[in-house]
Amino acid sequence: MTDTAAPAVLHVLDGPEPPGAYGELEPSSPPLIDDEGRVRLSFSRVDTYGNCPTKFRYAYVDRLPGQPGPHLSFGTSVHAALETFYDRKLPDCPSEEDLLGYLYDAWDSSGFVELSREEQLAFYRHAQDALRRFHRRAAPTYRLPADTEAWFELPIGELATVVGSIDRVDVDDDGELHVIDYKTNRKVKNRERVAGSLQLAIYALACEHLYGRLPATVCLDFVVAGVEVRVGIDELDLDAARAAVTETAEGVLAARYDPTPNRLCDWCDFRALCPAWGGAPDAELLGPAVTELTRLRRQVARDVRALRELEAGVASASESLRERGLDPVDPPDGRAREAASGTS
Ligand code: SF4
């Protein structure tokens, strides 16, 4: 092995002094309120706050873990397959077989762990059927989109930044842009509800922010039902979307988190904790989260121990190669060198 090949392999172990207990392995998540006092929101955060501020608090202020659930994993997998379908940078349409292969590669099984093998398989077959239907619709008019999974950070007024990604942005022969968002639930919304979609209004504003102009149309593509519902930009209420975002930011900055029982409470991950449903007092409230935290800390500690042992092993093997006059890989950091020389 040469020195030029080594850094790519060992880069993960190398680098500046760690910022925290687990060094570079520690991901950083942006704070809810940034240094400029702007609240970092997304469509789902604004939607959650609008449905129930207490749920928003549990999910985004306290950051209690939610349950992945089969429908979330199903949606993630189908979205990922469609992203690959449109992201090949080749003008010819991938075959149906290709598309099903993208699904296979992207399948996220994390939400299915509590299901039987047969139930999991039923979800997988269901996703395959939906993508077959999608292929039949998309193949005849396939063309490369302007963008897929287009990430945006959109400032709204003085108080908020809305972040997110648009599933797909198409461009037509006249240069007009068209925003497409995939939906993987069974229920199809009518035109009126699509026109009233806060998500699509936010995406339209994001499109203007990213590409300098509003899209001509926005659409929800109901992949499971095989139906696309498209509306013109004039049908959206962009001011109402800006107002909803600003109201959410104001509520967060004022720490207004009152519970609002609603029809979605039965599916809420935090119902057992919720004061509106006689949830546990504060002392017991964090029980499940603390259990998960303890488990994760143990797991990270085990992984870091294994990492350090591997570092020491690489350092030791490198030292031995040097002694034999060969060209070794440099040990990744000081600790590994110390371990190899027995000074730690
Ligand atoms: S159970 Fe209902 S009221 Fe309570 S946090 Fe969840 S959505 Fe809000």
Image (cartoon, rainbow, N blue to C red):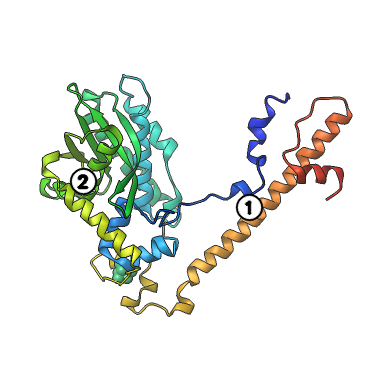
Amino acid type shown at disc 1: Tyr
Q: Residue at x 41, y 78 (%)?
A: 280
**In this picture, residue 18 sits left or right of residue 55:** right
Locate residue 58, reporting x and y percent.
39, 66
**In this picture, residue 20 sits left or right of residue 238:** right
Q: Residue furthest right?
A: 323
Image quarter where ligand 1 lies: bottom left
**In this picture, residue 130 sits left or right of residue 12:** left
Residue for badge 1: 22
Q: Which mark is residue 263?
A: none
Q: Which mark is residue 201?
A: 2
Image quarter where the N terminus lies is top right
Q: Nearer the viewer, residue 191 or 73?
A: 191
Q: Residue at x 49, y 72 (%)?
A: 287
Residue 269 visible in the picture: no
Is the C-beta separation of discs 2 and 1 under 8 Å?
no
Q: Nearer the viewer, residue 312 or 104?
A: 312
The secondary structure type at the circle numbered 1 is: loop
Locate residue 343, reporting x and y percent.
86, 48
Amino acid type shown at disc 2: Ala
Locate residue 265, reporting x and y percent.
29, 67
Q: Is residue 220 above or below residue 287?
A: above
Residue 256 visible in the picture: yes
Locate residue 83, reporting x and y percent.
35, 34
* Circle 2 Cα neighbour tier, 10 Å, few/some/many (<14 / 14–19 / ≥20): many
* Circle 1 Cα neighbour tier, 10 Å, few/some/many (<14 / 14–19 / ≥20): few
How many labels, in total? Answer: 2
Disc 1 C-beta below 8 A from ligand 1: no
**In this picture, residue 323 sits left or right of residue 122:** right
The secondary structure type at the circle numbered 2 is: helix
Q: Identify the image quadrant of residue 130.
A: top left
Q: Identify the image quadrant of residue 191.
A: top left
